[in-house]
Image (spheres, rainbow, N blue to C red):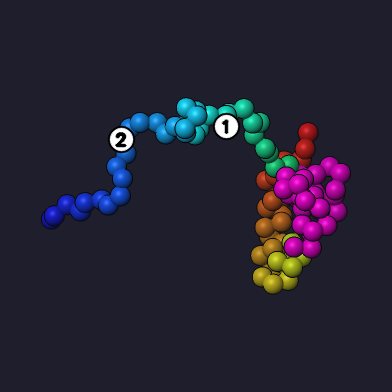
Amino acid sequence: MAERKRSGSRRTGKSSTRKNGKSNHEGHDDKPCKRLYRSKNDIIMGGVCGGMAEYMEVDPTAVRLIWILITLVTGLFPAIIVYLIAWIIIPQRP
């Protein structure tokens, strides 16, 4: 079989650098890892929507309304199962 030639640029093994001499990958280790927790403050059932709102830095009411809309559009059963699984898997904020 004939080999296929790749079009486009080839990797040269050099690290990518910007014009200022810094690598494109520098500075990413300085940020703390953002973690998803269930909320202790915004709890209606299990704190899942409140925790998602804290993680995304949005209003918890908006997350709850979107969750209700998704629940009604997809049918009650799948969304309720996903919520229960999230309630079990996502840890509560320490």
Badge 2 vs badge 1, beta-carbon distance below 8 Å? no
Identify the magenta region.
38-66
Residue 47 at x, y percent in the picture: 80, 49
Asked if the magenta segment contains residue 60, the reply would be yes
Residue at the disc numbered 1: 28
Disc 2 marks a residue whose amino acid type is Thr
Q: Which residue lies furthest to the left in this view?
A: 1
Residue 42 at x, y percent in the picture: 85, 48
Residue 11 at x, y percent in the picture: 32, 39
- Give the secondary structure at mark 1: loop
Residue at the disc numbered 2: 12
The structure residue drawn at horizontal position 68% and vertical position 60%, both measured from the top left corner, is 81
Apparent side of residue 65 relative to residue 11 in the rendered image (left or right): right
The structure residue drawn at horizontal position 13% and vertical position 55%, both measured from the top left corner, is 1
Residue 45 visible in this rendered orientation of the protein: no
Disc 1 marks a residue whose amino acid type is His
Task: Please say if 27 is above or below 86.
Answer: above
Residue 24 at x, y percent in the picture: 49, 34
Residue 1 visible in this rendered orientation of the protein: yes
